C-alpha cells in the first residue's frame, strides 16, 4: 500500500481536537468521515447518534509463542446533545502481568460522527483507504508500541450495533517485531441501556480463531453467548453457547466474587471447552450498593473441543459486573 494513501492522526491536547480532526476527516461533500471503519453507524436508524455509547476494542495477541503478549486498546465515546465524552485506555500484558500504560478522558463539541476514534496525547492513528484503521502507535519516555492491523482473517457481525473482525497483525516494540492476531470489536448501544455484554477472544494457532459475546447487560454466572470461529478451513457459528463460571474468588475491593475459570458448551454439542484465568486487571467503580461495579480484563488459557478435535487455546475475556 502506498504511503500517500494513509493519514497519521495526532492530537496532543483537548482544545486541538475540534481544530484538527474535522478538517482532516472531511470528504468531498464537506461531511465528516469516520476515523476507522464504522459498521455501527451504518446500522443506526436515521443516523441519530445522540444519547448513544460507542466502544471500539482493538486487541493484539501473539500466536504460537511460548510467552503470550497482549496489547488492548479501548476507545469509548458517549454522545449527548451537549457534546461527546471520550475515553481511551491502553494495557500491556506479558506472561502473567497486566500493566495499564495509558488512560485519558476528554470532551469535544457535538459531532455528526461521534463514533469516530480519536488519537490523544502520545497515541497516534494511521488510517488507510476508506478510513480503515491500520496502525495504533504509542510513544512515551522509553516505550514505543505499534499495533499493526494487516490482512483480514475473519469478519463476523452480531446484528444491529456491532461487528467483530480478526486480522493478521504484528506488535512492534522498539526494534523488535512479534507476529500475531488483532481483534477489532466495534459496538454501540443507547446510553440508557445496560452495558454491552462480555466478550471472549480465543486463538488456537493455525487451527482456530474464535470470538463469543454475551447479550447486553448479561452478567450472570451462567449465560448464553453467541459465537463465531474460523476452524481450520471452515467458518462456524454458535447461536447458543452456555458459558458458566466454574470457579470464583472474592474480590474484597469490589465486595463481590469474580470468575477465575469458565466452562463452555454449545447446545448442539459440536463445541465444549474450559478456560482458566492466568492474569487479570480490575477497574472498580463507585456506588452506594452492597457490591461495586467493575470491569475486568482476563488473560486465559484452556482447551476447546470441536467435533472431537481438542485444540489448546489462549486468549482474553473482557468482563463487566454492574
Image: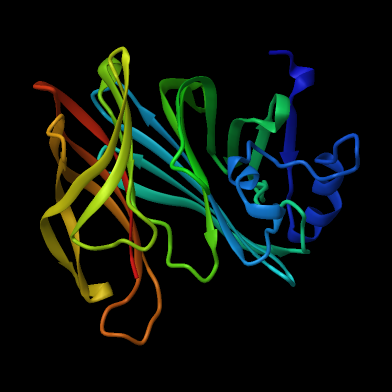
Which image quarter: residue 111? bottom right
| Picture quarter with the N terminus | top right
Is residue 184 visible in the rendered image? The answer is no
Coordinates of residue 184 in the picture (x, y in percent): 49, 36
User: Looking at the image, which is closer to me, 155 or 96?
Assistant: 155
On the picture, is 266 further left or further right than 41? left
Looking at the picture, tell me which residue is in the foreground, 28 or 77.
28
Q: Looking at the picture, does residue 170 appear above or below residue 85?
A: above
Residue 246 placement (x, y as % from top left): 9, 52
Q: Residue at x 24, y 33 (%)?
A: 314
- Apparent side of residue 26 relative to residue 189 in the rendered image (left or right): right
Q: How many marks?
A: 0
Which of 317 and 130 lies nearest the eye of the viewer? 130
Q: Where is residue 50? Give x, y as percent.
A: 68, 64
Residue at image position (71%, 42%) is 34
Residue that extends furthest to the bottom in the rendered view of this protein: 288
The structure residue drawn at horizontal position 16% and vertical position 42%, both measured from the top left corner, is 264
Q: Quadrant of the C terminus?
A: bottom left
Up/down of 248 relative to 314, above or below:
below
Q: Residue at x 83, y 40 (%)?
A: 24
Amino acid at each position: 500500500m502506498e504511503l500517500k494513501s494513509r493519514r497519521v492522526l495526532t492530537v496532543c491536547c483537548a482544545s486541538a481536537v475540534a481544530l484538527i480532526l474535522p478538517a482532516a476527516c472531511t470528504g468531498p461533500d464537506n461531511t465528516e468521515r469516520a476515523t476507522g471503519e464504522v459498521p455501527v453507524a451504518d446500522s443506526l436508524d436515521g443516523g441519530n447518534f445522540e444519547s448513544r455509547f460507542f466502544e471500539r476494542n482493538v486487541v493484539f495477541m501473539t500466536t504460537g509463542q511460548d510467552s503470550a503478549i497482549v496489547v488492548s486498546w479501548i476507545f469509548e465515546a458517549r454522545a449527548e446533545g451537549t457534546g461527546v465524552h471520550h475515553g481511551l485506555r491502553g494495557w500491556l500484558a506479558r506472561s502473567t502481568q497486566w500493566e495499564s500504560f495509558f488512560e485519558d478522558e476528554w470532551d469535544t463539541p457535538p459531532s455528526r460522527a461521534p463514533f469516530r476514534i480519536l488519537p490523544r496525547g502520545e497515541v497516534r492513528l494511521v488510517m488507510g483507504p476508506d478510513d480503515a484503521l491500520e496502525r495504533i502507535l504509542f510513544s512515551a519516555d522509553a516505550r514505543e508500541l505499534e499495533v499493526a492491523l494487516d490482512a483480514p482473517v475473519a469478519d463476523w457481525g452480531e446484528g444491529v450495533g456491532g461487528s467483530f473482525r480478526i486480522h493478521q497483525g504484528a506488535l512492534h516494540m522498539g526494534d523488535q517485531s512479534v507476529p500475531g492476531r488483532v481483534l477489532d470489536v466495534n459496538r454501540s448501544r443507547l446510553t440508557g441501556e445496560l452495558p454491552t455484554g462480555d466478550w471472549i477472544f480465543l486463538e488456537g494457532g493455525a487451527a482456530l480463531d474464535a470470538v463469543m459475546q454475551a447479550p447486553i447487560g448479561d452478567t450472570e454466572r451462567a449465560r448464553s453467548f453467541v459465537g463465531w470461529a474460523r476452524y481450520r478451513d471452515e467458518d462456524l457459528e454458535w447461536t447458543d453457547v452456555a458459558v458458566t463460571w466454574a470457579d470464583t474468588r472474592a474480590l474484597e475491593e469490589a465486595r463481590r466474587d469474580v470468575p477465575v475459570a469458565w466452562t463452555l458448551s454449545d447446545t448442539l454439542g459440536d463445541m465444549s471447552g474450559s478456560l482458566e484465568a492466568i492474569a487479570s486487571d480490575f477497574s472498580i467503580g463507585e456506588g452506594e450498593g452492597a457490591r461495586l461495579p467493575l470491569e475486568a480484563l482476563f488473560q486465559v488459557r484452556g482447551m476447546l473441543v470441536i467435533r472431537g478435535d481438542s485444540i489448546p487455546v489462549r486468549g482474553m475475556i473482557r468482563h463487566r459486573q454492574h
